[in-house]
């Protein structure tokens, strides 16, 4: 795989997506604090920007994170995760994810939060969706944008730990 990076989603478009998704969440959320559960590490930039926008709309946000890994290189592999100590009994949780492709990770997390952590509801907030790769049908309540079957990097998304720091989303080796 070459190191040539082609811009796929610009920084400006990402900013517009974050603002739109934040407005949708604030519009739909119950009064009170909005609980964001960020899937680390990929969703961190999206979650950070989303929090800033939600707070700018006058809502309080509480952040938690969960570490889930399902990729090695460009291949989806076995799911590993580090659980959350918090009890979410009776709470509405917004899972913030960078990309939903196979749906396996999100399906696992939704069930874990509802059954093991006692969440009242779980809403999925995903920057990207790649439906052509879906193996498990999962709801995406708040979607940034649907993409075609490309391996994307940047804005938190990585290839073996590289390229997360890009402020846009790109594709490697397409040029």
Image: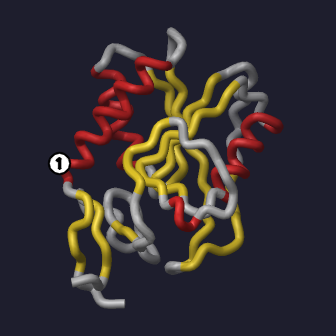
Residue in the picture at 72% in, 28% down: 119
Nearer-the-camera pick, 58 or 13? 13
Quadrant (top left, top right, bottom left, bottom right) of the N terminus: bottom left
Return the x and y of residue 26 as percentages of the image width and height: 41, 20
Residue on which disc 1 sits: 12
Return the x and y of residue 4 as percentages of the image width and height: 23, 83
Whether 71 is drawn above or below 61: the answer is below
Where is residue 89, by image quadrant? top right
Quadrant (top left, top right, bottom left, bottom right) of the C terminus: bottom left
Q: How is the image coloured?
A: secondary structure
In the image: residue 102, left or right of residue 114: left
Residue 29 visible: yes
Return the x and y of residue 98 as percentages of the image width and height: 46, 53
Whether 6 is drawn above or below 12: the answer is below
Whether 152 is drawn above or below 104: the answer is below
Q: Residues within 10 Å of mark 1 (few under 14, many from 20)?
A: few
State the SS at label 1. Answer: helix
Residue 37 visible: no
């Amino acid at each position: 795989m070459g190191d040539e990076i082609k811009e796929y989603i610009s920084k400006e478009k990402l900013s517009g997506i974050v603002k739109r998704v934040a407005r949708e969440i604030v519009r739909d959320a119950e009064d009170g604090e909005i609980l964001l559960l960020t899937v680390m590490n990929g969703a961190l930039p999206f979650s950070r920007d989303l929090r800033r926008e939600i707070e700018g709309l006058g809502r309080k946000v509480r952040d938690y994170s969960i570490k889930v890994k399902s990729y090695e290189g460009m291949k989806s592999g076995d799911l590993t995760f580090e659980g959350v100590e918090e009890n979410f009994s009776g709470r509405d949780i917004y899972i913030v994810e960078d990309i939903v492709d196979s749906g396996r990770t999100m399906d696992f997390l939704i069930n874990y939060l509802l059954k093991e952590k006692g969440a009242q509801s779980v809403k999925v907030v995903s920057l990207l969706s790649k439906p052509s790769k879906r193996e498990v049908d999962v709801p995406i309540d708040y979607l940034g944008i649907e993409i075609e079957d490309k391996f994307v990097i940047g804005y938190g998304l990585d290839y073996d730990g590289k390229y997360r720091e890009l402020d846009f989303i790109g594709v490697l080796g397409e040029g």
